[in-house]
Image (cartoon, grey):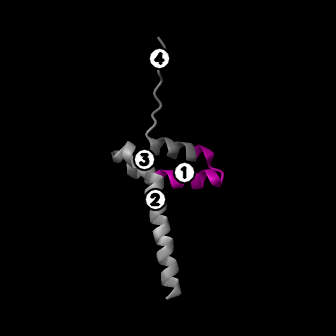
């Protein structure tokens, strides 16, 4: 019974974290929300273990940055 209570509390805390952490991203761009939800934690994990270049590529994919060169006028 104690395990059930502990697991329930952890699930509620995780759900609260997702709600408060990702709600601004969802409001900003709902179509790209799943990229953010999947890409950011994976990118943080890869950056933490030393794959900084791969982390940058995943971050750009998740955020939707494109390598467009702007010309100055």
- The stretch drawn in magenta includes residue 57: no
Residue 55 horizontal/vertical position (percent): 57, 47
Q: Which residue is mark 2?
A: 18
Q: CA distance from mark 3 to mark 1?
A: 16 Å
> What residue sits 47% from the left and 31% below the top?
67
Above or below, 5 against 58 in this view is: below
Q: Residues within 10 Å of mark 4 (few under 14, many from 20)?
A: few
State which tag comes first along the sequence, 2 or 3: 2
First in residue order: circle 1 vs circle 2? 2
Instruction: Tell me where residue 45 sits by quadrant.
Output: bottom right
Task: Compare marks 4 and 3 and give the one earlier in the sequence.
Answer: 3
Q: Which mark is residue 43?
A: 1
Label disc, if present, on residue 25 of the rendered structure? 3
Foreground: 48 or 21? Answer: 21
Q: Could you say whether the residue bearing mark 4 is in a helix, strand or loop?
A: loop
**Residues in magenta, as a range:** 39-54
Task: Judge from the rendering whether residue 18 lies leftward or rightward of residue 27; answer left or right.
Answer: right
Return the residue found at the far bottom: 1
Nearer to us of marks 4 and 3 is 3
State the mark number for residue 21: none
Q: Is residue 41 above or below residue 62?
A: below
**Residue under the point 49% across and 81% down:** 5
Q: Residues within 10 Å of mark 2 (few under 14, many from 20)?
A: few
The residue identified by callout 4 is 71
């Amino acid at each position: 019974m104690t395990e059930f209570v502990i697991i329930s509390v952890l699930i509620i805390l995780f759900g609260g974290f997702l709600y408060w952490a990702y709600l601004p991203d969802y409001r900003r761009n709902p179509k790209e929300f799943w990229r953010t939800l999947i890409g950011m934690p994976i990118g943080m994990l890869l950056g933490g273990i030393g794959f900084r270049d791969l982390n940058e590529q995943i971050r750009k994919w998740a955020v939707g940055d494109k390598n467009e060169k702007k010309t100055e006028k």
